[in-house]
Amino acid sequence: MDKAVKIKGKTVELTNLQKIYWPKEKYSKGELIEYYHLVSKYIMPYIKNRPHSLNRFPNGINGKSFYQKDVKDKVADWVTTEEVYSESNDENINYYVCTDEASLLYMVNLGCIEINPWFSTTKKINNPDYLAIDLDPLNISFKKVVETAFAVKEILDKAKAKGYCKTSGATGMHIYIPLNKKYDFEIAREFAHVIAELTNELVPDFTSIERSPAKRKRKVYIDYLQNRTGQTLAAPYSVRPRAKAPVSTPLEWKELSSIEAPEEFTMKNIFNRLKKKGDLFKGVLGKGINIENCLKNLGVQ
């Protein structure tokens, strides 16, 4: 079943709406598109006017998937694109830029189950709105991920820096620190490196900042290297291409200990939570930290 929807003057052709994307749960592509329509007011602040890496699953979570970064001549004429340099690809790429709900749903119709925005907007492409610490476990319990997150918070509290946490929706957690475009990616990455090193020193038994998986078995990887141009993380409120359709969900620090698994929140149950708690991630796009002051507070030269 196909249909065309008009959103603020833009026509979005929605195709194969009955195609099953989650075979076990019997969730369809149409249900995924409906989710993003309903959650659009929450997710848009974190994806608007940003380049996106498209991770496409045209046949659902068990089908073949592929990444698409360069969309030159491959999307509708009304879709905004931006040619920018990708540090991770070492070349100029015409990226898809999400500007509104229409371009969000167009992206989802292409098979994008998850939404992967840059840390910066096209307005100031080299200056991220935030930095992120990605906690990625390898053969270790989610409980240790939570302990690592609290260790990160301990460092941030000492630095007098506000941090915001969310489930990754997969196996780990993401912690964001607002920058408000004050610094470029290199400075953001250097500060993220400091946070990662100090956190690793706090809990060395079950964490690592070693990039090679072979050298960090049964550890939580504290990944600070995401903080560079062209890198992405799943957006807040993004669905992940995994069983049960989990959602990357912002949390309050006080509730973190009670979270049993990062896939606890799904596209089918997230709205009850949103009605009660609203958007817990708003501060990420607010006043940025002062890195120089944070380093002084940490006693780092």
Image: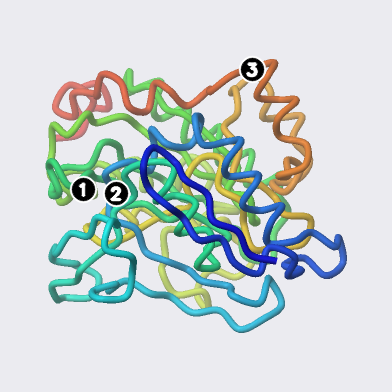
Q: Are marks 2 and 1 in contact (CB under 8 Å)?
A: yes
Residue at the image point whose x is 62% and y is 38% from the top: 147
Instruction: Categorize mark 3 by other alpha carbons within 10 Å: few (<14), some (14-19), many (20+).
Output: few
Disc sitting over residue 146 in the figure: none
Horizontally, residue 114 falls left or right of residue 282, namely right
Disc 2/disc 1 C-alpha distance (Å): 5 Å
Q: Mark 2 — residue?
A: 193
Q: Between 92 and 108, which is closer to the camera in this rendering?
A: 108
Q: Residues within 10 Å of mark 1 (few under 14, many from 20)?
A: some
Q: Which residue is mark 1?
A: 190
Element under label 3?
Answer: helix
Corner quadrant of residue 7: top left
- Residue at x-position 30% and y-position 37%: 130
- Name the residue beneath numbered marker 3: 277
Q: Amino acid at mark 2?
A: His
Residue at the image point whose x is 79% and y is 55% from the top: 244
